Amino acid sequence: MTAKLAQAVALIDRLAGYTFENDRLLLEAIDTTGMRVPQSNQRLALLGDALLKHVLLDDWYPTGTPKGSGNAIVSRIGSNSNLASVARDCDIEPCIITHPGHRGAVSAATLSTTVEAILGAIYLDSDKSMIEVRGTMRAFGLMPSMAD
């Protein structure tokens, strides 16, 4: 197990109380290099983005508020800048595996993609449990108050 993977395993367990059965999924989620898996964490991120939107809209729909309200929640919570802030606040950035030649801070886009990829990895690892996805979103601060 790489040091960054071990750090990510401990972080997810501490923050969300989730323990991976298949650490390779988490490794794929934090690896942005494309050296281990083609397209790096992009495929998991696409799945995680859809899951994030699903949970947000599933909670929004019963409120009966207009469509614009649902769109606003998804835009605010699911924006790259918000997801990057979440990654920084949750200390995910040090767990991200970047290309060996990378210098400096991890970009907001990469931070955002990694948060989405982690959600996708948890979904797949947990036998597609939306309860685990919701719990992780809650732990990451991605569950809005519907009063917002």
Image: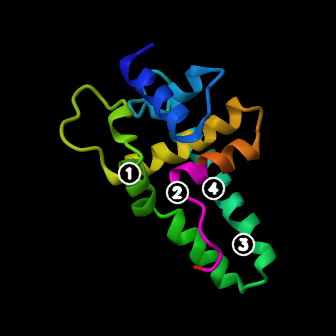
Q: Cβ–Cβ below 8 Å for labels 2 and 1?
A: yes
User: What amino acid type is highlighted by mark number 2?
Assistant: Gly
Q: Which mark is residue 141?
A: 2
Residue 52 circle label: 4
Query: Does residue 101 appear left or right of residue 140 in this picture?
Result: left
Mark 1 neighbour density, 10 Å: few (under 14) some (14–19) many (20 or more): few
Name the magenta segment's main secondary structure: loop
Range drawn in magenta: 137-147
Residue at point 42%, 46% (across, down): 90
> Of label 2 and label 1, which has the lower sequence position?
1
Gap in angstroms between the C-alphas marked 2 and 4: 12 Å
Look at 67% across and 64% down and name the residue there.
Answer: 56
Q: Any magenta on residue 144?
A: yes
Residue 40, visible in the rendered structure: no
Residue 106, image x and y in percent? 29, 44
Tell me what residue is drawn at x 62 percent, y 76 percent.
Answer: 71
- Alpha carbon of mark 4 to alpha carbon of mark 3: how far? 12 Å
Mark 4 residue type: Leu
Name the kind of residue labelled 1 in the image: Asp
Say if the magenta span includes residue 71: no
- Residue under label 1, please give it: 89
36, 134: nearer the viewer: 134
